[in-house]
């Protein structure tokens, strides 16, 4: 493994150096989870194309730029008369491309962060898509950080592996594909503290670590193609059910005369402690700096949680696994969205489904 990885990195570095001599940035890294691979440094002077300038993608791309990668960007709904999404990049001289194909033509690595499976498929295989121009491509690595169904991730991996590299990299003749969805939300994307759940070959994962380290604080290898998407769906399913359970318990407590702040304090030092109570409390007035403290604005939209629960339900059904809590959570979030709460953070289930009350302001 170490020998193969070293050859891959050597090939990548040789192919992309192209007589560049300035601003080479070295980044040391190690992987405690993979002691069989020892690497001291790698060249981060790669051309990285980033597609998807939404609330998450724009911060991820900016962190790559700040880390020294040569970045170009594209957004699938970009309208140049409304350039807010790309203006920070234009201000820094970052190229804004008009199509995914243009991104592929000028990039060593392409990262996508898009809303749905349909968007991802169109960007990769549609007209002017990343893989549309020919059977050979320049990028040696494609990373999709979107939250999509595992089947689509695996189909894309097969499509990418069917292409040839325009320039052979050492022993590597075909591009790699990683599915690498994230956890952490907008604040973590901005701070560069995301967690990546990565599926694909271990070689590609290890070679891509400098990219993950520039955008996040942790990356976890989950196994073969599609396993990153599986991990993300399972993570969000557990998060949704946890938020529903905490919201239900806090509402019952309020109805019986216990303040939500008191009950949350009990949860947080006892067996009910969880992220939904001690880090992302859904009751307005209990915790500062979370969506519930700003009328559920920002954060992770309920419509996105509903979408992820749909993906979880389909995956469970396909696998023949019982999933009653998934079905119940799916129904609750779709009901929230149907009542004009789709853009609000998913913690709004406390107020808009259970009818929970704000914590009274202390005098």
Image (tube, grey):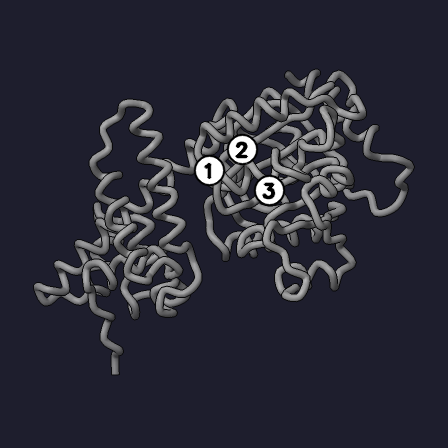
Q: Nearer the viewer, residue 10 or 94?
A: 94
Q: Of residues 115 and 36, which is closer to you in this image?
A: 115
Question: In 3D space, how far apart are the residues under numbered discs 3 and 1 (Cα atoms)?
Answer: 12 Å
User: x, y percentage for residue 336?
Assistant: 28, 56
Badge 1: few (under 14), some or many (20 or more) residues near its Cα, within 10 Å?
many
Q: In the figure, 151 relative to 335: above or below?
A: above
Q: Secondary structure at mark 3?
A: strand
Reading the chain from its start, which is encountered first: label 3 or label 1? 3
Quarter of the rendering occupied by the N terminus? top right
Percent position of residue 145, x then y: 54, 40
Quick check: 84 above or below 71? below
Whether residue 201 is visible, yes or no, is no
- Which residue is depicted at the point 31% across and 52% down? 276
Q: Nearer the viewer, residue 112 or 292?
A: 112
Q: Tell me if label 1 and label 2 are in contact, CB under 8 Å.
A: yes
Mark 2 or mark 1, which is nearer the start of the sequence? 1
Mark nearer the N terminus (3 vs 2): 3
Secondary structure of the residue carrying tag 2 is strand
Instruction: Indicate the secondary structure of the residue bearing disc 1.
Output: loop
Name which residue lies at 85% across and 35% down.
Answer: 17
Given contact means CB atoms under 8 Å apart, are the residues at marks 3 and 2 in contact? no
* The label number, if any, that marks residue 179 in the structure image: 2
Which residue is disc 3 drawn over?
112
Task: Give the alpha-carbon distance from disc 1 to disc 2, as whole Å.
Answer: 9 Å
Badge number at residue 148 = 1
Q: Quadrant of residue 348?
A: bottom left
């Amino acid at each position: 493994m170490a020998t193969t990885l070293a050859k891959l990195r050597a090939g990548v570095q040789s192919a992309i150096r192209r007589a560049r001599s300035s601003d080479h940035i070295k980044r040391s890294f190690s992987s405690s989870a993979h002691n069989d691979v020892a690497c001291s440094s790698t060249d981060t002077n790669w051309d990285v194309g980033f597609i998807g300038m939404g609330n998450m993608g724009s911060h991820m791309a900016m962190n790559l730029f700040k880390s020294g990668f040569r970045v170009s960007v594209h957004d699938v709904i970009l309208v140049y008369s409304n350039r807010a999404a790309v203006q920070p990049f234009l201000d820094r001289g970052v190229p804004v491309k008009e199509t995914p194909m243009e991104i592929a033509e000028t990039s060593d690595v392409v990262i996508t962060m898009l809303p749905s499976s349909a968007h991802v498929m169109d960007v990769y295989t549609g007209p002017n898509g990343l893989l549309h121009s020919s059977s050979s491509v320049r990028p040696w690595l494609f990373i999709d950080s979107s939250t999509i169904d595992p089947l689509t991730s695996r189909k894309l991996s097969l499509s990418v592996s069917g292409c040839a590299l325009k320039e052979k990299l050492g022993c590597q003749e075909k591009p790699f594909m990683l599915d690498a969805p994230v956890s952490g939300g907008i604040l973590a994307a901005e701070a560069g503290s995301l967690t990546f759940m990565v599926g694909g070959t271990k070689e590609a994962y290890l070679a891509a670590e400098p990219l993950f380290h520039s955008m996040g604080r942790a990356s976890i290898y989950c196994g073969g193609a599609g396993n990153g998407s599986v991990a993300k769906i399972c993570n969000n399913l557990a998060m949704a059910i946890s938020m529903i359970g905490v919201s239900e318990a806090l509402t019952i407590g309020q109805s019986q005369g216990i303040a939500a702040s008191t009950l949350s304090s009990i949860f947080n030092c006892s067996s009910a402690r969880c992220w939904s109570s001690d880090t992302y409390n859904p009751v307005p007035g209990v915790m500062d700096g979370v969506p519930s403290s700003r009328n559920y604005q920002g954060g992770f939209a309920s419509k996105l949680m509903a979408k992820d629960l749909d993906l979880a339900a389909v995956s469970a059904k396909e696998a023949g696994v019982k999933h009653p809590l998934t079905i119940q959570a799916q129904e609750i979030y779709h009901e929230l969205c149907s009542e004009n709460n789709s853009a609000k953070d998913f913690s709004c289930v406390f107020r808009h489904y259970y009818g929970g009350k704000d914590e009274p302001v202390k005098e």
